[in-house]
Amino acid sequence: MSTHDDRPKHKLRILAFVLLLIAGGVACRSDEKAPATDSAPYAAAVAAPLSVDRALDDRFAFIAGLATGSPSYSVLEAEPAWRDYAKAADKAWAEFEAAVLGPMRAWAASDLALARERTKTLFYPFGGPDLATAQSLFPEQPVTVLLGLEPVGNLPELDRSTPAARTVFYTDMGALVLDFLTRGYFITKEMTDIYSRREVDGALPVIGFFLKRGGYAVAGVRRLAPAADGTWTETPYEHSAERPHRPYGIRIDYFKPGESLLRTVYYFSCDVENRAFTAGSPLHSFLAGLGRPTTFIKAGSYLLHWDNFSTLRSLILDRSLYVLEDDTAIPYRFFVRGGWGITLFGRYATPVKDFTNVEQLDLRAAYEDPETKVRPLPFHFGYRWLTQVDNLLLAERHRRPY
């Protein structure tokens, strides 16, 4: 609670208003609603106090297999099951860092330099809780928006559970995140099976794992629900016994210790097929209000090849400043037809056997054309993680309309 008189408050309001204008738009922030406007996602990134929510931060650290230093967790951290889980997580994370994330960061710092400089929001549909890849490719952006079918879920209350239930949680978390750290993507069916057991009941703990393993501190967590007027209502995080109807979401505010930028990651549990994702719906309005995001898609099950996902495809093409994707996302022809600047990386190969009628002969021809000047891709993270034949396309919207 503030003890200042009205005059300093007035000066602070003026200063805050100026900072918002400098940031590129007036951002209206409320504890109750986050309007789906161009400025809404940036509210958390502007001049907010950087203070750790210690209780939440410790819970995130513990589920990431990291010692908290908190007396509240000392007994749990001494249990053999948690120690085994933490050891396995340390090993898998170090290997993934060396094989994928480190080379990915080095590559992105060079080949995505301009895109990263211009990116204020990263939109990652079909990413599920994969915050690790988003942070490695685009570490500077204030806002990240993740979409997935999977429920948001809860942070586990492990101090109130039995040793047997905690062991199941560590086993299920290991199956989720350690498999991801082997392949570089999630398998929806496996995630659904684990979430149905309810020890790990959604994406939130997995996002927390990546957030803490990335070295970030948690400033706050809020739940998101669509309001009757089409905006989004935010409420403080509480354990939820029921799964709401999709779409709904979670917002995590976080920061890198020693830095002054407060960042936000949104995760929305949603169905983005046309029948559920319609123009003017709360989620569509929120996403349309992101300004000019950079869109990133990998391991997207080729859904955006099909007309029943055309609403999301059109939104991405209409709004994105850049699109970075592998061949499982928007077909190459849409970027050629739209006059986008295109850079190709890696190697194109026939889609894996799980997917049919999605081979792109025009994209293959572009890769094989010596005039294309395809650039190398020094890491592996997609469906071809066994054969290590990966591709990425970077499309840049032309600054002048045709």
Image (spheres, rainbow, N blue to C red):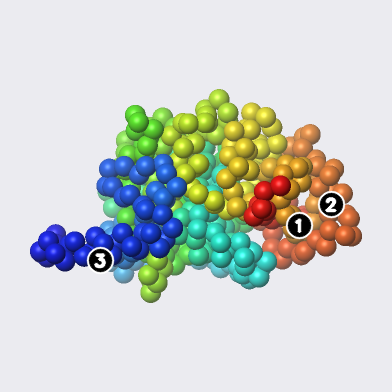
- Seen as rendered, the residue at the extreme top is 275
Task: Say left or right for 55 vs 215.
Answer: left
Mark 2: few/some/many CA within 10 Å (<14, 14-19, 20+): some
Which one is in front, 32 or 215? Answer: 32
Q: How many marks?
A: 3
- Give residue 330's position: percent from left, percent from top: 69, 42
Q: Which residue is mark 1?
A: 344
SS for callout 2: helix
Three-letter code for the amino acid on which mark 3 is drawn = Pro
- Which numbered disc flags the more N-terminal residue, 3 or 1? 3
- Give residue 14's position: percent from left, percent from top: 26, 62
Three-letter code for the amino acid on which mark 2 is drawn = Ala
- Seen as rendered, the residue at the extreme bottom is 258
- Please indicate, yes or no, whether residue 281 appears anywhere in the rendered image: yes
Q: Which residue is mark 2?
A: 366
Question: In terms of image quadrants, where is residue 380?
Answer: bottom right
Q: Which residue is mark 3?
A: 71
Q: Are marks 1 and 2 in contact (CB under 8 Å)?
A: yes
Q: Residue at x 29, y 61 (%)?
A: 16
Q: Which mark lies nearer to you, 2 or 3?
A: 2
